[in-house]
Image (spheres, helix red, strand yellow):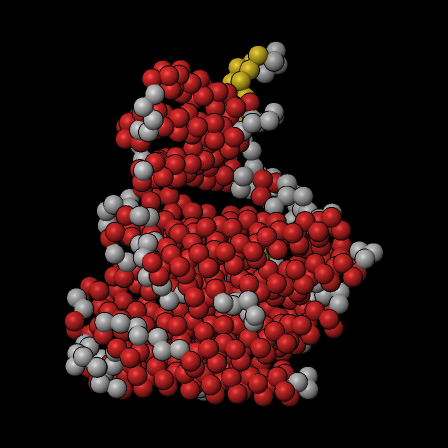
Amino acid sequence: MMNSIILNAATRLLVSLLLVFSVYMLLRGHNLPGGGFIGGLIGSTGFILYAIAMGPKACRKALHFEPQNIAMIGLGISLAAGVFPVVMGESFFTGQWIFIGDRASGDYIPVSSVLVFDIGVYLVVFGAILTLVLALEDEV
Amino acid sequence: MSWILATPIIIPFATAVLAFLFRHGPEGRWLSVLGSAGLLVSSIILMLTVLDEGVIAAQMGQWPAPFGITLAADLLSAVMVVITGITGLAIAIYALADVEQRKEQLGYHALYQVLLAGVCGAFLTGDLFNLYVWFEVMLISSFGLLILGGTRAQLDGGIRYVTLNLISTILFLSGVGLLYGMTGTLNMADLHGAVQEVDNPGLLVVVAVMFMIAFGVKAAVFPLFFWLPASYHTPAISVSAIFAGLLTKVGVYSLIRTFTLIFTTDIAYTHTILLWVAGLTMVTGVLGAAAMNDFRRILSFHIVSQIGYMVLGLALFTPLALVGAVFYLVHHIIVKANLFLVAGVARRIAGSTELGQIGGLYKTAPLLALLFLIPAFSLAGFPPLSGFWAKFLLIKAALEEGGYIIAGVALAVGLLTIFSMTKIWGYAFWKPHPAGLEPRLSRLSARDRAALLTPIAALAVLTCIIGLFPEPFVQFATRAAEQLLDPQTYVQTVLAAAPEAGQ
């Protein structure tokens, strides 16, 4: 933890920016560079910055959940996204797509099990990195 | 069809998630038992399907082979998954009484289940890069299990374990890269044909040797076994047992798979190396065991020596030798895991695994002595236990091939195995306890006794069944070996496993 007023002030701004950016990376990742892994890394940097500026205790409080649990829930979400196609009668990890809106006019939002899988990956990476970093910060 | 192949991987992963979220209460350990039972059931279903239909294969995400990730099971894969289920369940029950609450709260059960998922994944995958991924899954979870608790000895063993295994994975990965560069595919069935067309057979042999070293480190063969006796005696007994039973066998399985399916272009060269490795592994392992004075260290060195027998079966590369190797694999996993479990009970009631500090178990805990005797004699190769038939098949195969020297070595190593087993017997069971303690099973609570002894007894009964009625098991191993030596069905099934739409 660093006692710097500049870092503290900048962190408040940067954390929210990094978190929004990480979700943006997650969502654009299906067809463009990005995705769950890189999104999770960026998201965790936000909280790492917060831990450096405000201390690991405040960071844990801001997270609300233990980072280990976040990672494990992410693993569960990814698994569920992989198993879901079986319920639909296809092989594991086959992408399932739903189109919300009018598909003919091109005015629609595609939602897929691939995205759910990516959200799981996001949480796994996010939780795992924060587990490591917070454990290291605690020691100091 | 694809769900049959994927459930042995999915169930442990799902159990890991649940067990981790419930790690602070008693639910976690019961979830682990339940998940392992589910794994056993799904593996038996897989086995029945494979017996019924022959080789089965499925494509993940409906990407056709050789581009997508293939899961495939022939008889060898199926039996390995079943054995994983059996030992997984036995050790999950044993862990009910063996693992302290502190380790449970650190996520013991979740790591254990991820390890099982990794092992099953390695047995079922039909893709070399995917195999690498499963090796990593196993390495991460096993490292976690190894250092859980964080004592000095554990960290020391853990660092050696992870360093040597990382070297192995780097070699593996480089081999995968080179192979991909030469053939343009990593699907094992596709590689079977593709390696025949490589215009640089010399380089292919180099890659084969890289794989041999990589899997050799995992399997702990001579001269790459140092990490095993350095680390296996440090963690909780249930961790030692699952490592001893399964981890090295994944290396042996990968050796058998790649050196029957892919690297068969220069058998005279590669399999001669394997033969030397097998002999030296047997001898050094058993000599190490004879020199040790700790229950678990002796058993760890025995693993090394026994791995030699399995590699011998692969090296001889005759139908009978492969039958012996498959039989040996199955028998060894059960017996070895069981011996570690017995060592754990001995430590609980006598206070140590150091042979100089315990004793008197035969007089006051005769049941434990009996339960030790069955796997110990089986390991040494006494008729009519399972180890006898395993050794018999291998030595017969060696003699048929005119390998009198290697057969003699195998027999002599068997004798030395008995010698080091009698050492455990004499020190831990016959000699009176040096501190005058009377180690009795009744010192354990009734609940602990049930959780510790039931899996040991069940595995011992299994050893006896294989020993007394070897015929169906040998027939099974014969069919498995036939599939290994003639991989045409495997190749065709994998490459024809069309993505199934809306089954």
B325 vs B98, nearest the viewer? B98
Name the side, left or right, on which B100 lies relative to A131.
left
Position of B415 relative to B93 (above/below): below
Q: Position of residue B58 (x, y in %)?
A: 59, 49
Name the side, left or right, on which B178 lies relative to A31.
right
Q: Quadrant for the N terminus of chain A, please.
A: top left
B18 vs A44, nearest the viewer? A44
Position of B254 relative to A57 (above/below): below
Residue at image location 63% in from the left, 76% down from the top: B276
Residue at image location 71% in from the left, 49% down from the top: B180
Q: Quadrant of residue B20?
A: top left
Q: Quadrant of residue B149?
A: bottom left
Residue at image location 55% in from the left, 49% down from the top: B133
Name the side, left or right, on which B127 lies relative to B347.
right
Q: Quadrant for the C terminus of chain A, please.
A: top left
Number of labelled discs? 0
Q: Position of residue B147 (x, y in %)?
A: 37, 55
B287 vs B131, nearest the viewer? B287
Q: Is residue B325 visible?
A: no
Residue at image location 23% in from the left, 71% down from the top: B351
Q: Is residue B401 visible?
A: yes
Q: Position of residue A36 (x, y in %)?
A: 50, 31
